[in-house]
Image (cartoon, rainbow, N blue to C red):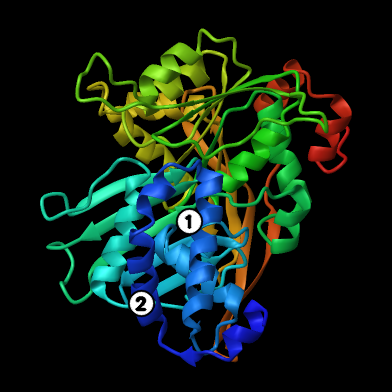
């Protein structure tokens, strides 16, 4: 009799009971498993699970034989039911509000409960501790709040007892950054921006105008910035600086594995010894000596903001992100960050950051879960030194209504103004063909 036939002739038990039995059985084989290589170890564990289920005719209602093996393996070795969400291409965030309340955020904007939940508060804690172990961090009563990472693009923040309620076990946010690379057409199709807006931003970055992308967490800043950097010609050198973990993956290769473009990825290194600590500000200082054509500072959140604006004002092309509620508020946010480095008056700092980043775009995830570029602005510097933040493009909301329990926001993208003659001159001096400039200006040949 084959395994499948034997399986369906077996007696049913709850999954939790089967798990306890299989775990007890595997503990007797632990020494053998430790002597194996990782790939061989997985194969051996699966073989032991399969043999035990067959010998004892264990069956869980609703699960096929192979499905039960996969669930048992994930529960004992991987990250329980979270495993398939962590490495899915259409998942961008896992939010755990309690052991029995896990919500999944998908790339299409949907937020749905997970197909399964943890069995108990202790179960949730054990799985999350296994996740944190990947970054060498420990969750316990003395360290109830921790942050770590699973891979270059997966961040995790965890809150445990006594910060959270005992009957909830744990709360966590697992952010999967840019699980799939989006193309220009994807942004257009999803309603993030028009092709004209995307082309404008790409040409600004390509021809030397520094840009700041602003918005709240989860608004799509990093994904959009990653696409903009992917439009840089292969012969231009890109230098990226990120805090703690690497989210960008900009290296392009051909079918034979040869690198096509020119990219250096760097991340910070934290240390209690100040001599060993390497923060974004220090990486930015060294980046200026590494012959970069474009410098990407993943996020301005501290004193590196001053170094970033200094780099942008001294001829380097810089693209970065920060958290702010509008394009105008972005400059005041930069001023606040810069004061963490130097005690300068706000007017002076405002003049510096507006000169450094003439282009700012504000992105937002609206109530209908669509991410949109709400506004692109230019800061114009007049002859008397005064500044004026002028909208170039914006998304105008016409109506908000509820359809079948879902919010629908209707509106249109509008072009409000052309870039100023001063920025047009800079683009031409930096190599932008006149024909492309005329396209940006709607065909105006003046």
* Residue 399 visible in rendering: no
Q: Position of residue 76 (x, y in %)?
A: 40, 62
Q: CA distance from mark 1 to mark 2?
A: 20 Å
Q: Helix, strand, or loop for circle 1?
A: loop
* Residue 238 visible in rendering: yes
Q: In this view of the protein, which residue sits in the foreground, 353 or 122?
A: 122
Q: In this view of the protein, which residue sits in the foreground, 279 or 127?
A: 127
Displayed quadrant of residue 140:
bottom left
Q: Is residue 145 left or right of residue 359?
A: left
Tell me the quarter of the image containing the N terminus: bottom right
Residue denoted by label 1:
218
Q: Residue at x 39, y 25 (%)?
A: 280
Work out whether 9 lies above or below 262: below
Q: Residue at x 60, y 69 (%)?
A: 397
Displayed quadrant of residue 335:
top left
Q: Position of residue 220 (x, y in %)?
A: 55, 52
Q: How many marks?
A: 2
Q: Position of residue 101 (x, y in %)?
A: 35, 77
Q: In this view of the protein, which residue sits in the foreground, 76 or 344?
A: 76
């Amino acid at each position: 009799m084959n395994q499948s036939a034997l399986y369906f002739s077996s007696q049913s038990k709850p999954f939790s009971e089967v798990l306890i039995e299989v775990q007890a059985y595997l503990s007797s084989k632990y020494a053998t498993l430790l002597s194996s290589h990782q790939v061989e170890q997985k194969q051996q564990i699966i073989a032991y699970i399969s043999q035990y289920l067959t010998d004892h005719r264990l069956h869980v209602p609703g699960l096929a034989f192979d499905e039960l093996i996969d669930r048992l393996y994930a529960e004992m070795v991987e990250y329980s039911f979270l495993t398939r969400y962590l490495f899915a291409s259409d998942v961008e965030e896992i939010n755990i509000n309690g052991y029995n309340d896990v919500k999944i955020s998908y790339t299409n904007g949907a937020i749905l409960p997970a197909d399964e939940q943890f069995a108990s508060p202790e179960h949730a804690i054990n799985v999350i501790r296994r996740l944190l172990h990947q970054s060498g961090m420990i969750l316990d009563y003395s360290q109830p709040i921790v942050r770590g990472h699973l891979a270059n693009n997966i961040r995790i923040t965890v809150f445990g007892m006594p910060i959270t309620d005992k009957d909830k076990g744990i709360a966590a946010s697992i952010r999967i950054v840019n699980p799939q690379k989006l193309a220009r057409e994807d942004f257009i199709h999803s309603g993030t921006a028009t092709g004209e807006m995307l082309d404008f931003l790409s040409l600004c970055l390509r021809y030397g105008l520094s840009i700041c992308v602003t918005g709240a967490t989860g608004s799509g800043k990093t994904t959009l910035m990653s696409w903009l950097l992917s439009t840089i010609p292969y012969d231009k050198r890109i230098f990226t600086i990120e805090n703690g973990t690497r989210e960008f993956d900009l290296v392009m290769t051909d079918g034979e594995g040869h690198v096509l473009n020119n990219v250096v990825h760097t991340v910070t290194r934290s240390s209690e010894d100040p001599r060993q600590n390497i923060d974004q500000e220090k990486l930015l200082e060294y980046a200026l000596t590494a012959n970069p054509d474009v410098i990407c500072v993943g996020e301005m959140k501290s004193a590196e903001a001053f170094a970033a604006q200094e780099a942008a004002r001294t001829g380097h092309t810089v693209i970065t992100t920060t958290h702010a509620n509008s394009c105008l508020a972005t400059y005041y946010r930069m001023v606040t960050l810069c004061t963490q480095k130097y005690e300068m008056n706000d007017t002076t700092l405002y003049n510096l950051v507006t000169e450094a980043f003439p282009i700012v775009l504000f992105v937002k995830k609206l109530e209908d879960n669509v991410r949109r570029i709400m506004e692109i602005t230019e800061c114009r510097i007049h002859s008397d030194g005064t500044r004026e933040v002028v909208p170039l493009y914006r998304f105008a909301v016409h109506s908000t209504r509820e359809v079948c329990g879902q919010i629908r926001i209707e509106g249109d993208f509008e072009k409000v103004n052309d870039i100023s003659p001063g920025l047009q001159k800079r683009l031409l001096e930096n190599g932008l063909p006149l024909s492309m400039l005329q396209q940006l200006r709607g065909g105006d040949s003046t």
